[in-house]
Image (tube, rainbow, N blue to C red):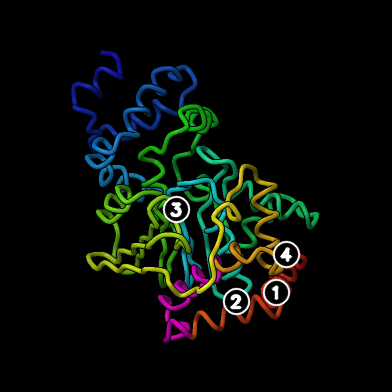
Amino acid sequence: MNFLKKIKINNFIIKNNFMEKFFNYINEKKNFNNSIIILKYFSKKEVIKKNVKNFFNFLNKKIIKYKKKFDLFLSGTGGGINTFNITTSLFLIMTALKIKCVKIGSVAYTSSSGSIDFINKILKIFGKKKKFKKKINIFEINDFLDIKISKTFIKLRKIIKKKTIFNIVFSMLEPFDYKLRAIGSDSCSNLKILNLISNKKTLIFNSFNIDEFSLFKPSIILNNSLKFFFFNNVFKKKYKEKKILSNSKKESVDIFLSAIENRNKTARDTLIINCSMLLYFIKKIKNVNNCFYYIKKQFKNGSIKKNLFKIINDL
């Protein structure tokens, strides 16, 4: 029987005993056209919700565990509106603040610049090669997954240009030991799906169409069954959303550099509010206002830029 027909008969539910065959099938070049159809089904919310636990449990058993312990583990479903790479920028800033931080990243599938594209562009500015990304604790799926993701699979995700079940599941895998995990969700619906497979050490956050805390819209944070709402009135000034929008990896890097150099206040303060909340939740500083003023001071006195550039130069 045709593989696609089998999946349809099972109402697009992939059971544990069929999971290995499913992954092998969509990773093979000869199944490319059928796999496009299959992945389009697995971009539908109702199909994702039915399968997310099985996919997560299967893939989480296939990971290679790293022994090193981190304070903060960052990942996300990717995108929303096309902002500069905010989560990856947060990873770099928290690293510059000497927080033990790790991130799962990828090349761009549905956005203009993936976190790996962004990191590689920054490393290139400093004359560093791509291999250095692991030295600053940013990892791709293939770095720790025992089932290798083929070039065919990568091409599939780029062609369909939609968020699929893999955006959810890959963001939830646990190859690292961590004190706190922060996962950005690009939508409220994905926020609920992610919460199905989260734990007490995980924060899932969303600001409607942005997968980070926003200066422009209320932010929602889920911690297992607890829900927090932040109506972001910390900042008194008015901001322009277009100041954080990006259409290329070059633009993303330019915005990031302008933020850490205090030239783009909208981008800078977006990073400040995000860093403040992360610092608060990992309990490095107990009072959220103190977190905010501490991070703001590090930006204004140039410590963020100085420390980050030193880390990259020392690679």
Of 241 and 20, the residue lying toward us: 241
Location of residue 286 by image quarter: bottom left
Q: Name the amino acid type tagged 1.
A: Asn
Q: Name the amino acid type tagged 2.
A: Lys
Specify the label residue 210 is tagged with.
Answer: 3
Q: Which residue is mark 4?
A: 312
* Circle 3 or circle 1, nearest the eye: 3
In percent of width and height, residue 89 lies at 59, 61
Disc 2 secondary structure class: loop
Distance from the alpha carbon under mark 2 to that under mark 1? 9 Å
Instruction: Give me the residue at 49% from left, 68% from top.
Output: 274
Distance from the alpha carbon under mark 4 to that under mark 1? 9 Å
Q: Name the amino acid type tagged 3.
A: Ile
Q: Name the amino acid type tagged 4.
A: Ile
Judge the density around disc 1: few (<14), some (14-19), many (≥20) Cα neighbours within 10 Å: some
Specify the label residue 98 is tagged with.
Answer: 2
Instruction: Give me the residue at 32% from left, 53% from top.
Output: 191
Instruction: Say which label, 2 or 4, has the lower sequence index.
Output: 2
Distance from the alpha carbon under mark 2 to that under mark 4? 13 Å
Distance from the alpha carbon under mark 3 to that under mark 1? 28 Å
Specify the label residue 31 is tagged with.
Answer: none
